[in-house]
Image (tube, grey):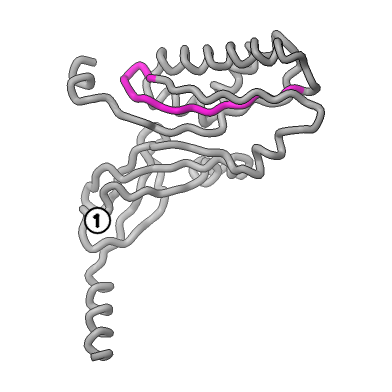
Amino acid sequence: MAEEKKRVVKKSWREKEWFEVVAPPMFGSQKIGETLASEPEQLLGRVFETTLGDLIEDFSKSHIKLYFQVKEVRDRQAVTKFIGHEMARDYIRSQVRRRAGKVDDIATVTTKDGYKLRVTSMVTTLRRVQSTKLDFIHKDMRKVVETRAAERTLDQFVQEAVLGKLSADIYKEAKKYCPIRRVEVYKSKVLSEPSSAQVKSQ
């Protein structure tokens, strides 16, 4: 019985094939890795994690995790879509200093092409500031995130959020109220995609 089971395991392993997993075009369709599967259909919906540092070969970006989900398989290539990003918790903790102000915001936004995302951002100040100023910063950072999302497609918005352009835009507004230490858009998640009717009308 044990012998028979061993033969079945060996056979199933040999029947599996290697598939290359690639990032979506917004990240240059770069190779994320490889995975085994018996059938291409088994890969659909599977989630893969990598870092921005690995993807663009920049070690300074290794604290940014990217999450991709397989949406289709072409030949031996598993094509993914972006479903979210997150900065390492240790990195976020290192940005917060004692006796300094901190403002967090979680915004639900819709992109120009109809994708809905939850975006989490953070502003830290060089020193403690009045709560009224923190309220102004919070209001402006929310406005920047919502406005940028409405003006950009998913691809454009995600690139700006992950690569730092969105943080820079928030920084420009926040620095009007007090000296700013750091701005990070440290987490995002795609909540829903546009319906087929919305896509056709675009």
Residue at x 57%, y 26% (from the top left corner)? 121
Extreme residue toward the front, this view: 131
Q: Is residue 114 magenta?
A: yes
Q: Position of residue 74 (x, y in %)?
A: 22, 47
> Disc 1 residue type?
Gln
Residue at x 33%, y 50% (from the top left corner)? 46
The secondary structure making up most of the magenta span is strand
Q: Is residue 42 magenta?
A: no
Neighbour tally class for label 1: few under 14, some 14-19, many 20 plus, Cα within 10 Å: few
Task: Quickly name the residue at label 1.
Answer: 42
Question: What residue range appears in magenta?
Answer: 110-125
Q: Secondary structure at mark 1?
A: helix
Residue at x 59%, y 23% (from the top left corner)? 167
Residue 182 falls in image quadrant: top right
* 180 to the left or right of 81: right
Residue 86 higher or lower than 42, as above or below: above
